[in-house]
Image: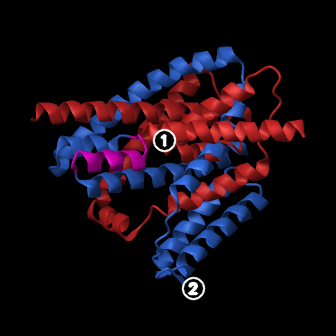
C-alpha cells in the first residue's frame, strides 16, 4: 500500500511540474518538468519507487500516435514544395549530430550507442520515449536531448526577438 | 460513426493501427518498439485514410509526463558525480549544435533565396512544434519551417532504428 501511495505521489508531482513548465512555455516542458520533479522525488534516500512498465508502454504508444497525427495534408504540401532541399538539410543536420556523437564517444570513452542516441537531432520526447526501454545509462542520452532542445529554443527565441527589434 | 458532425472512424482506425503496430513490436522485444511501431503504423493509416486526428492537450501532457517521470527515476539511480560531469558536456554539445545548425540554416536561406530567419528557425533542432510556433509568432515562412523540421525528425527516427539494431545485437 505504501508503495502505491509513493507511486501516486510520484505521478502527481510529475504531472503537476509538467503542467507548470508547459504553462511557462518552456520547450519540451512536459518532459523537462516531470523529469526534474521525478528526479528530486526518487533521489530521496528512502525512495525505492519504480514506474510500472505498462504505464511506460502506454505512454510510448500514445506519443508515437501523437507524433503521427502531426502529419497532415498541409505537412505533405510543405514537404512537396521543399522536397529536395529539405532532405539535404535533414541529412546534413543528422550527420552533424551523429558526428558529434561519435566524437564524444571517442573523446569521453563512452558507449557509442548512448552518445549517438543523445546527439541525434530527433525530438527530445521521441528519443526519450525510445531510450526508456534501454538500460539506465541511456538516461544520459535523454538528458543531452533535453538540454539541446531547450537551449536551441531559448537561443532562437532571443535571436528572433533581437532581430525583430533591430528591424524596427 | 458520426458524433458532433465529425467522422470518428478514421481517427479510431489510426489510433487502433498505432496501438497494434506498437504492441506488435513490443511482443517481438524490439527496443523502443512501442513508440516506433505506433509511429509507423499510425502514420501509414493516417496517410491512407487522410485522417485528421487531434488529441486534447492534457493527453499529450500526461503521456509526456509519464516518460519524463520514468526518466527522472532512472537519472536518480545514477551517481551524482556522473550527472555533474554530463551537465558540462550537454552545454558544450548544445553550443556546438546551435552553431552548426545556424551555419546550415544560413547556407540554405542563401541558396534558396529565403529570409535568413526562416533558414535559421527551419534548421534549428529545437523541437518541431516549438519551432513552428516561433515561425508563426514572427511571421516567417511556416511551410518551409515545417517541411525542414518534419523531414529532419523523420530522418532522425529512421536513423535510430539501425543504431538500435547494430548496438543491441
- Chain A in the picture: what colour? red
Q: Provide the residue span drawn in magenta.
A: B125-140
Q: Which chain is blue?
A: B
Q: Quadrant of residue B100?
A: top left
Question: Can residue B90 be seen from the camera position used here?
Answer: yes
Residue A165, horizontal then vertical, whole percent:
15, 32
Question: Who's the residue at 73% across and 65% down the image?
Answer: B24
Check residue A22 in the rendering and tell me which mark sits there, or answer none: 1
Mark 2, chain letter? B
Q: Residue at x 54, y 74 (%)?
A: B11
Image position of A118 with respect to B46: above or below: above
Farthest residue, direction bottom: B1
Tell me: A130 left or right of B132. right
Residue lying at 31% horizontally and 68% vertically, measured from the top left: A77
Callout 1: SS: helix
Residue A102: mark in rendering: none
- In percent of width and height, residue A102 lies at 53, 31
Considering every residue shown, the one lying at the far top of the view is B81
Q: Circle 2 sits on which residue? A: B1
Look at the magenta stretch and give its main secondary structure: helix
Q: Is residue B148 above or below residue A113?
A: below
Residue found at x 52% / y 67%: B43
Q: Are marks 2 and 1 on the same chain?
A: no
From where the camera sits, is residue A137 visible?
no
Q: Which residue reaches farthest left? A: A168
Name the element at disc 2: loop
Can you give x and y, in whole percent of width and height, for residue B72 in the image? 66, 33
Q: CA distance from mark 2 to mark 1?
A: 34 Å
| Looking at the image, residue B10 lies above or below residue B125 | below
Amino acid at each position: 500500500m505504501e508503495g502505491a501511495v509513493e507511486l501516486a505521489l510520484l505521478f502527481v508531482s510529475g504531472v503537476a511540474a509538467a503542467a507548470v513548465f508547459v504553462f511557462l512555455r518552456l520547450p519540451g516542458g512536459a518532459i523537462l518538468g516531470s523529469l526534474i520533479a521525478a528526479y528530486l522525488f526518487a533521489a530521496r534516500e528512502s525512495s525505492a519507487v519504480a514506474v510500472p512498465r505498462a504505464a511506460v508502454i502506454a505512454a510510448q504508444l500514445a506519443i508515437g500516435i501523437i507524433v503521427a497525427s502531426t502529419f497532415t495534408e498541409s505537412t505533405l504540401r510543405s514537404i512537396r514544395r521543399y522536397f529536395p532541399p529539405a532532405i539535404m538539410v535533414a541529412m546534413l543536420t543528422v550527420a552533424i549530430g551523429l558526428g558529434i556523437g561519435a566524437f564524444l564517444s571517442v573523446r569521453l570513452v563512452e558507449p557509442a550507442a548512448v552518445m549517438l542516441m543523445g546527439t541525434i537531432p530527433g525530438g527530445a520526447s521521441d528519443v526519450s520515449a525510445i531510450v526508456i526501454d534501454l538500460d539506465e545509462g541511456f538516461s544520459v542520452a535523454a538528458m543531452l536531448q533535453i538540454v539541446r532542445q531547450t537551449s536551441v529554443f531559448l537561443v532562437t527565441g532571443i535571436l528572433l526577438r533581437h532581430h525583430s527589434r533591430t528591424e524596427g | 460513426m458520426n458524433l458532433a458532425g465529425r467522422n470518428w472512424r478514421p481517427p479510431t482506425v489510426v489510433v487502433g493501427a498505432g496501438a497494434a503496430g506498437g504492441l506488435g513490436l513490443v511482443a517481438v522485444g524490439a527496443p523502443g518498439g512501442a513508440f516506433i511501431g505506433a509511429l509507423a503504423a499510425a502514420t501509414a493509416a493516417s496517410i491512407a485514410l487522410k485522417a485528421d486526428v487531434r488529441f486534447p492537450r492534457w493527453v499529450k501532457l500526461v503521456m509526456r509526463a509519464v516518460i519524463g517521470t520514468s526518466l527522472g527515476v532512472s537519472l536518480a539511480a545514477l551517481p551524482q558525480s556522473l550527472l555533474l560531469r554530463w551537465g558540462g558536456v550537454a552545454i558544450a554539445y548544445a553550443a556546438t549544435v546551435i552553431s552548426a545548425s545556424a551555419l546550415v540554416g544560413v547556407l540554405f536561406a542563401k541558396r534558396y533565396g529565403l529570409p535568413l530567419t526562416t533558414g535559421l528557425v527551419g534548421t534549428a533542432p529545437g523541437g518541431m512544434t516549438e519551432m513552428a510556433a516561433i515561425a508563426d509568432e514572427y511571421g516567417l515562412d511556416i511551410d518551409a519551417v515545417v517541411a525542414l523540421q518534419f523531414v529532419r525528425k523523420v530522418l532522425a527516427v529512421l536513423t535510430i532504428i539501425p543504431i538500435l539494431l547494430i548496438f543491441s545485437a
